[in-house]
């Protein structure tokens, strides 16, 4: 009897696995018709299966929760490598100053405003309030790329928004971790904080660039052995690079992103490099095509997984109303800073691109990680966890609504 039950469980697991993949594909394929992206439905499905119906054990200490760091690392490595592969270095160079201005001004303004609101609404410790505020300061680097692939926004705007999401995803970890350290020891460590900034802005990108040049050398010099397995070997290198970067206390997300950008753009750096990489140009195309398919698969399950690990332990009206207010403020702040990107909007699709950019407010992985840190550090803070998770849900609701409005404009006949 136990053997039969075990077989039924395995079969159900396989059916659920394939069903989630097909649901993600169907929602993506029908986006232009139903005007709903796959992000929120998959997250809500995970929320239903896990925390609400408890079909899957997602409580503290469960397998689903314990593997969270590994699932997150794999998702980041796969998705940000794909994002890097899809960016043109020339386009990125053209928009980098404007994108940086928009990214940092908006993230700092949003973090401060949210922190002050949380402090006055919930009467929390000022450090905890700003931890939550800056954890929610920017859009998700995993959710945004999936959204842009079902839209028609121009290449320059897409590059700027992707740059913003990658940078702010790291800022959303860096600033709260800095504040957590101050809260824990009660003092500011200038040396550690300076090292954190240097690692983020200098060492992580340099590390990613060095690895990209090294990997091009390997693909070129060992092409007769690696040609058939170029994608598998490359993605293995990407995952290893992420792990090494993290072990060196660098930012793996930034390193992997730069690795992808440099890898496919190396031929554009000089005539010598163009000639040197001529024989492996097909390998770049092969890697990009395979990576696109795998990224869809990984991101589909990651959205479902985010829903699974949501924890709302002490839901009350103040938390609910507070998180809705925060989500609305995030949207309004973004709308306020939109004029900075005016030069990047195409006149042909001006209205629809502004709609998409304004509604690009979905929060994801980084704030979810910060939400679990108080418990891991023994600080309590379930209110922080609940507020961040609820705000993640409502920002994704806003983005889904925005994509619906965008699709009605952009795909209008």
Image: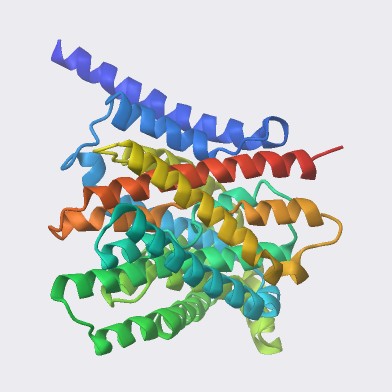
Q: Is residue 261 left or right of residue 371?
A: right
- The C terminus lies in quadrant: top right
Residue 192 position in % (x across, y down): 25, 84
- The N terminus lies in quadrant: top left
Q: Toward the viewer: 185 or 247? A: 185
Residue 122 position in % (x across, y down): 31, 53
Please give the name of the residue rendered at 44% of the width and 33% of the height, measured from the top-left corner. 44
Please give the name of the residue rendered at 32% of the width and 62% of the height, measured from the top-left corner. 129
The residue sitting at the top extreme is 1
Q: Toward the viewer: 231 or 52? A: 52
**Quarter where residue 251 is shown:** bottom left
Q: Is residue 410 left or right of residue 357?
A: right
Residue 229 position in % (x across, y down): 49, 58
Q: Toward the viewer: 140 or 350? A: 350
Residue 232 seen in the current view = no
Residue 256 position in % (x across, y down): 45, 68
**Quarter where residue 332 is shown:** bottom right
Q: How is the image coloured?
A: rainbow
Please give the name of the residue rendered at 28% of the width and 74% of the height, measured from the top-left corner. 178
Q: Is residue 353 left or right of residue 24?
A: right
Position of 135 relative to 275 (above/below): above
Q: Is residue 241 left or right of residue 123?
A: right
Position of 1 relative to 210 (above/below): above
Q: Toward the viewer: 120 or 98? A: 120
Residue 366 seen in the current view = yes
Question: How many numbered dots are placed on residues in this image?
Answer: 0
Position of 35 relative to 194 (above/below): above
């Amino acid at each position: 009897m136990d053997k039969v039950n075990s077989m039924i469980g395995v079969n159900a697991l396989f059916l659920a696995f394939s069903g989630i993949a097909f649901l993600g594909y169907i929602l993506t394929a029908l986006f232009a018709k139903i005007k709903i992206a796959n992000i929120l439905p998959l997250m809500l499905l995970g929320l239903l299966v896990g925390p609400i119906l408890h079909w899957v054990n997602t409580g503290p200490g469960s397998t689903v929760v314990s593997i969270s760091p590994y699932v997150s690392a794999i998702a980041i490595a796969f998705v940000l490598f794909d994002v890097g592969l899809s960016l043109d270095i020339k386009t990125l160079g053209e928009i980098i100053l404007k994108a940086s201005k928009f990214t940092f001004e908006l993230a700092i303004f949003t973090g401060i405003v949210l922190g002050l609101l949380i402090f006055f609404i919930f009467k929390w410790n000022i450090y905890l309030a700003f931890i939550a505020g800056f954890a929610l300061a920017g859009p998700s680097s995993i959710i945004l790329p999936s959204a842009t692939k079902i839209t028609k926004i121009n290449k320059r705007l897409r590059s700027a928004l992707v740059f913003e999401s990658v940078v702010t995803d790291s800022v959303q970890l860096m600033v709260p971790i800095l504040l957590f350290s101050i809260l824990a020891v009660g003092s500011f460590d200038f040396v550690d904080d300076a090292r954190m900034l240097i690692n983020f802005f200098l060492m992580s990108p340099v590390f990613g660039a060095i690895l990209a040049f090294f990997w091009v050398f390997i693909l070129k010099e060992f092409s007769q052995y690696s040609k058939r397995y170029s994608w598998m070997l490359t993605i293995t290198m990407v995952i290893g690079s992420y792990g090494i970067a993290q072990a060196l206390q660098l930012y793996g997300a930034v390193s992997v992103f730069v690795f992808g950008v440099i890898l496919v753009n190396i031929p554009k750096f000089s005539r010598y490099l163009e000639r040197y990489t001529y024989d492996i140009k097909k390998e770049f195309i092969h890697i990009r095509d395979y990576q696109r398919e795998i990224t869809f698969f990984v991101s589909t399950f990651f959205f479902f997984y985010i829903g699974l690990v949501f924890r709302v332990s002490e839901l009350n009206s103040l938390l609910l109303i507070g998180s809705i207010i925060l989500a609305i403020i995030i949207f309004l702040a973004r709308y306020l800073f939109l004029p900075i990107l005016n030069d990047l909007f195409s006149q042909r699709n001006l209205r629809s691109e502004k709609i998409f950019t304004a509604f690009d407010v979905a929060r994801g992985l980084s704030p979810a990680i910060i939400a679990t840190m108080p418990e891991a550090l023994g600080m309590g803070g379930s209110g922080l966890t609940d507020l961040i998770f609820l705000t993640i849900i409502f920002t994704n609701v806003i983005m889904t609504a925005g994509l619906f409005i965008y699709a009605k404009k952009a795909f209008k006949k």
